Amino acid sequence: MELHLYFNQLSGSIPDFSSLPSLTQLHLNSNQLSGSIPDFTSLPSLTQLFLYNNQLSGTIPDFSGLPSVTQLGLSDNLLVGQVPDYANLPRGTFDTILDLSNNNLCGTLPTDNPATSGSPDVSGNTFLNPPPAWCGECATFDDVAGLCCPTGQYLDSGGVCQACDSTCDTCDGPNADDCLS
């Protein structure tokens, strides 16, 4: 069974699909979905999961409970944290697509990840070795420069993280009127 609901202007969180255990393809890409990515382990037949081009946030869940997934598209969201280590999956699990590009991912990129037979697309993220202690808490991200700043800081024109005004949790500049939250 396939469910293709892309380009439908769907909003809100991803619904529970556990009543569809024979679902093989779930395409929810290019909508306005928000919130975190739910646990899909109740869908053992799932081979394609496309959630790209939404407003999903939080960390990338462990997909090792879905060994049938061969195509995983999570690009162009607001995902944070480190790329999960899929080393416990069979070689070539993601044989066609593993697209994690254009998120706020940071940390250490797994160098030899046997779960992919090709190269995963992780462009537009920040990878440092060792990962900063705040990895997963990117508040300011510049996808052109590939830099990420923690909560309470912003990226200045020189590419350096600077403190926000004391009245801001997040900001895009040093002044109180630059507060985003």
Image (cartoon, rainbow, N blue to C red):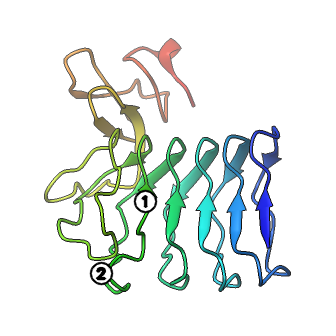
Q: Quadrant of residue 143?
A: top left
Q: Is residue 6 left or right of residue 73?
A: right
Q: Quadrant of residue 109?
A: bottom left
* Looking at the image, residue 33 lies above or below residue 149: below
Q: Of the two numbered discs 1 and 2 on the same chain, state the one appearing first in sequence.
A: 2
User: Looking at this view, is 64 or 140 the one in front?
Assistant: 64
Q: Quadrant of residue 88?
A: bottom left
Query: What's the residue type where badge 2 is placed?
Result: Ala
Q: Is residue 149 left or right of residue 20?
A: left
- In this rendering, the count of numbered labels is 2
* Looking at the image, residue 82 lies above or below residue 180: below
Q: Give the image location of residue 47, x and y in percent.
A: 60, 73
* Residue that mark 1 sits on: 98
- Asked if the residue at tag 2 contacts the one at tag 1, i.e. Cβ–Cβ closer than 8 Å, the answer is no
> In terms of secondary structure, where does tag 2 sit?
loop
* Residue that mark 2 sits on: 87
Residue at the limit of the structure toward the right, as seen here: 19
Query: What's the residue type where badge 1 is placed?
Result: Leu
Q: Give the image location of residue 90, x and y in percent.
A: 36, 86
Give the residue displayed 52% in from the left and 41% down from the top: 76
- The local crowd at label 2, few if under 14, some if 14 to 19, many if 20 or more residues have their Cα within 10 Å, is some
Q: Give the image location of residue 63, x and y in percent.
A: 50, 76
Give the residue displayed 17% in from the left and 65% down from the top: 111
